[in-house]
């Protein structure tokens, strides 16, 4: 029985494909024409060969943006922000203040998205004008 590996292939149109191949197949990735140079990834292809001499071409996938083996853990950084603006009237007129809280998480871009809300758990005091601050302080 041959060991198998699964490739996750991202195509230019944003679709992902899973391709399962024997472990010993040879994979190449590059321009459509060998030696050709291109400024974008639209002409890149993924080639699969059944032998190390690259004589048994098994498949060619065009418009491939990227690929990786399924077992590799990939995470992307996600930063969510919450802003609040305050207006305070003082002896010198009105002044505007703003506060921002950021939440950074790492998530697997290939797993199903949980329900996403624009609201994340932030204490009300984190986004409020300190009580001891007056507009005369600025």
Image (cartoon, rainbow, N blue to C red):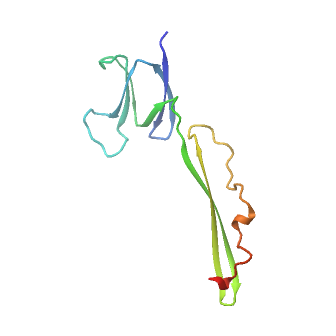
**Residue at the outermost front position:** 132
Q: Residue at x 54, y 45 (%)?
A: 76
Front-most of 18 and 69?
69
**Residue at the outermost left position:** 35
**Residue at the outermost bottom position:** 91
Rendering coords of residue 111 (x, y %) = 60, 37
| Picture mark count | 0
Above or below: residue 81 compared with residue 15: below
Q: Is residue 80 found left or right of 4 in the rendered image?
A: right
Above or below: residue 55 compared with residue 74: above
Quadrant where the C terminus is found in the figure = bottom right
Q: Is residue 137 found left or right of 17 in the rendered image?
A: right
Q: Residue at x 57, y 50 (%)?
A: 78
Rendering coords of residue 81 (x, y %) = 62, 59
Quarter of the figure with residue 127: bottom right
Front-most of 11 and 116?
116
Rendering coords of residue 16 (x, y %) = 51, 35
Q: Is residue 2 found left or right of 48 in the rendered image?
A: right
Quarter of the figure with residue 96: bottom right
Above or below: residue 18 compared with residue 77: above
Q: Residue at x 53, y 35 (%)?
A: 73
């Amino acid at each position: 029985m041959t060991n198998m590996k699964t490739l996750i292939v991202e195509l230019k149109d944003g679709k992902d494909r899973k391709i399962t191949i024997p472990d010993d197949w040879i994979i190449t990735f590059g321009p459509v024409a060998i030696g050709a140079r291109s400024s974008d990834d639209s002409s890149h292809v993924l080639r699969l060969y059944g032998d190390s001499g690259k004589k048994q071409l098994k498949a060619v996938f065009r418009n491939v943006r990227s690929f990786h083996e399924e077992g590799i853990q990939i995470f992307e950084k996600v930063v969510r922000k919450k802003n609040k603006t305050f207006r305070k009237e003082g002896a010198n007129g009105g002044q505007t203040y703003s506060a921002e809280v950021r939440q950074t998480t790492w998530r697997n871009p290939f797993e199903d998205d949980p329900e996403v809300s624009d609201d994340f758990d932030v204490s009300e005091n984190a986004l409020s004008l300190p009580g001891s601050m007056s507009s005369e302080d600025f």
